Image (spheres, rainbow, N blue to C red):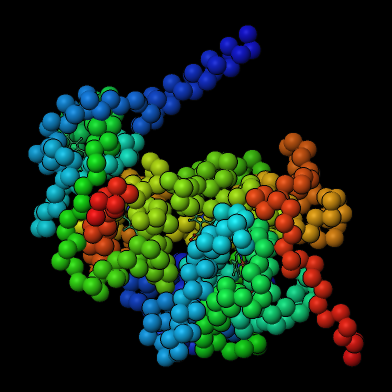
């Protein structure tokens, strides 16, 4: 009797989480591949996206955390993250499809970031400094203290940023700085981005674009 | 302890009186230079050099190597895990920003104020002994030997950070320690603290305070539990914890919590379990009486009657005793 009661309560709590939460849905990668057909024009069939130097870069989705991807799609849909292009495409997906495409992209092997190759040594050195040690004179906490060693991501909250395209990293940091992106929990990212100069943003974007996104990629290099 | 003037905006590093004015243009919008300028009138304001400054410094290349090693040990103390460190901390887990940042107990201060008498062990300590103290308690560990490569490198790093600051200053030091905000009108509350912790902190430190490893790599330290500092550490005291939190957390947003929140969360965290104090006599009441005037060690937790520190769990360290704890000094000096 008692046990039954407890498990009911557990179930209820679980259901509420799924209903209220944005990420609790179980995704199916195979179904996701079908739902992702309309995405590949920009994010590419292998999920590698593309660095577009003078326009809107398409982020690499391959290998990103599934729950992080799903959160972003829900945020685009709900207007918590504003982007005209993505609002259209996110709106085409229901909750199940979001979970499915998230599962699909998360299991694709990560590809190499683009847009960091032309950066000179000084810029890359500054980028590495910000990534690994930060610049505490401006109270810029190192990126890796949240995004993890090598910027490879931590759990579903802190996305991997190593191996992402420079153009995309740059626009996101600028968006936080200019308050056009503010869907981060507890203003964790915004607080840091607002302290960065445009040169800092340039430097760290180039650095991470040249870094391996995953351990596999590292050994392949 | 230094009282810290109420800031209007954030005030952390920036200008320097001893090393030259090094304010970056964009930093001025983030940090209140006013607080620092005010402080400079009657406090010692020192901006320690950075690792970039080290590269261009006019010192012997061998010394540079040793300072670099000291910096590396300070920010990645986990490389001494199992030998000198038995918890999930680096020195920089509490001394943020490589030990340079004001209000995060910047460590160069010790290099210009020691040797001096220290109440905690009742004798005169030098820099190495001070560092050894943080190993025995904050790192729940066993310090490297005095004069060892590790100890020398760490103290070289501390001392180099103090470059240009006067020895035995006659003014209080700006940003020293973890000054706590004023005690809020409403006494701190465990329940409010728990809620505020879950809302503001658990995203990184986890709901159970165990911190976080990602693919076996260390990311977020443990504010309590086996992976944390032991009961003898300074940060286990309510006031120090409140100061640390207010001045440094959530990461990247210092002084963003209210005084009330900082004290509530500190109250909650300092009422959780952690590894036993290495000075444990085998009896919690006796240990509390002898060593714990200012922590909650040995006290009874209100909501469940648990006596804090009443256990013989020393964490990963097991029954290894740090050699520096209780080591007598200067016993034969005459009074005059």
Residue at (11, 58) in percent of width and height: A53
Residue at (48, 52) in percent of width and height: B218
Which is more toward the observer, A103 or A216? A216
- Residue B152 in percent (x, y) is at 58, 78
Which is more toward the observer, A56 or B40? A56
Which is more toward the observer, A128 or A74? A128
Judge left or right: residue B308 versus residue B182: right
Quarter holding residue B262: bottom right
Classify A9 as above or below B97: above
- Residue B252 in percent (x, y) is at 44, 59
Residue at (28, 25) in percent of width and height: A28
The image quadrant where one finds the N terminus of chain B is: bottom right
Which is more toward the observer, B73 or A202? B73
Classify B230 as above or below A95: below
Q: Is residue B100 visible?
A: no
Classify A219 as above or below B104: above
- Residue B335 in percent (x, y) is at 90, 87
């Amino acid at each position: 009797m008692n046990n039954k009661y407890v498990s009911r309560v557990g179930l209820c709590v679980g259901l509420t989480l799924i209903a209220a939460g944005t990420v609790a849905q179980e995704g199916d990668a195979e179904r996701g591949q079908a739902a992702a057909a309309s995405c590949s024009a920009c994010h590419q069939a292998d999920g590698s996206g593309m660095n577009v130097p003078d326009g809107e870069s398409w982020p690499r989705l391959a290998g990103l955390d599934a729950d992080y991807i799903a959160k972003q799609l829900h945020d685009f849909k709900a207007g918590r993250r504003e982007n005209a292009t993505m609002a259209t495409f996110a709106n085409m997906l229901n909750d199940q499809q979001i979970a499915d495409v998230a599962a699909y992209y998360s299991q694709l092997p990560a590809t190499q970031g683009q847009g960091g190759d032309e950066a000179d040594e000084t810029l890359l050195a500054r980028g590495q400094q910000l990534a690994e040690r930060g610049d505490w004179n401006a109270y810029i906490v190192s990126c890796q203290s949240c995004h993890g060693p090598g910027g490879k991501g931590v759990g579903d909250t802190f996305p991997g940023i190593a191996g992402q395209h420079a153009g995309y990293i740059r626009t996101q940091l600028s968006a936080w700085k200019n308050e056009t992106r503010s869907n981060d929990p507890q203003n964790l990212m915004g607080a840091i981005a607002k302290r960065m100069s445009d040169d800092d943003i340039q430097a760290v974007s180039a650095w991470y674009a040249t870094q391996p996104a995953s351990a596999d990629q590292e050994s392949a290099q | 302890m230094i009282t810290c003037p109420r800031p209007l905006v954030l005030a952390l590093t920036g200008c320097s009186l001893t090393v030259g004015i090094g304010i970056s243009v964009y930093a001025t919008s983030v940090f209140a230079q006013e607080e620092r300028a005010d402080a400079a009138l009657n406090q010692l304001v020192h901006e320690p050099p950075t690792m970039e400054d080290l590269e261009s410094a006019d010192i012997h290349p061998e010394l540079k190597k040793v300072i670099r090693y000291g910096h590396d040990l300070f920010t990645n103390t986990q490389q001494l895990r199992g030998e000198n460190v038995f918890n999930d901390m680096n020195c920089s887990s509490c001394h943020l920003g490589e030990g340079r940042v004001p209000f995060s107990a910047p460590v160069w201060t010790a290099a210009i104020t020691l040797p001096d008498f220290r109440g905690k062990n009742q004798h005169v300590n030098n820099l190495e002994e001070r560092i050894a103290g943080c190993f025995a308690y904050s790192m729940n560990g066993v310090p490297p030997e005095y004069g060892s490569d590790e100890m020398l490198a760490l103290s070289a790093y501390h001392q180099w950070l103090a470059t240009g600051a006067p020895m035995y200053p006659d003014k209080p030091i700006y940003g020293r320690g973890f000054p706590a905000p004023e005690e809020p009108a409403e006494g701190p509350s465990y329940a409010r603290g728990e809620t505020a912790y879950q809302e503001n902190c658990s995203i990184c430190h986890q709901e159970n305070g165990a911190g976080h490893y990602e693919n076996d790599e260390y990311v977020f330290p443990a504010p309590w539990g086996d992976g944390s500092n032991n009961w003898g550490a300074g940060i286990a005291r309510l006031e120090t914890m409140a100061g640390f939190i207010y001045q440094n957390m959530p990461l990247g947003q210092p002084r963003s919590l209210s005084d009330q929140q900082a004290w509530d969360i500190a109250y909650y965290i300092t009422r959780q379990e952690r590894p036993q104090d290495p000075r444990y006599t085998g009896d919690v009441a006796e240990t509390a009486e002898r060593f714990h005037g200012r922590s909650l060690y040995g006290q009874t937790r209100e909501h469940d009657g648990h006596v804090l520190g009443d256990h013989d769990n020393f964490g990963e360290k097991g029954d290894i005793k740090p050699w520096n704890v209780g080591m007598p000094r200067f016993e034969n000096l005459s009074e005059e």
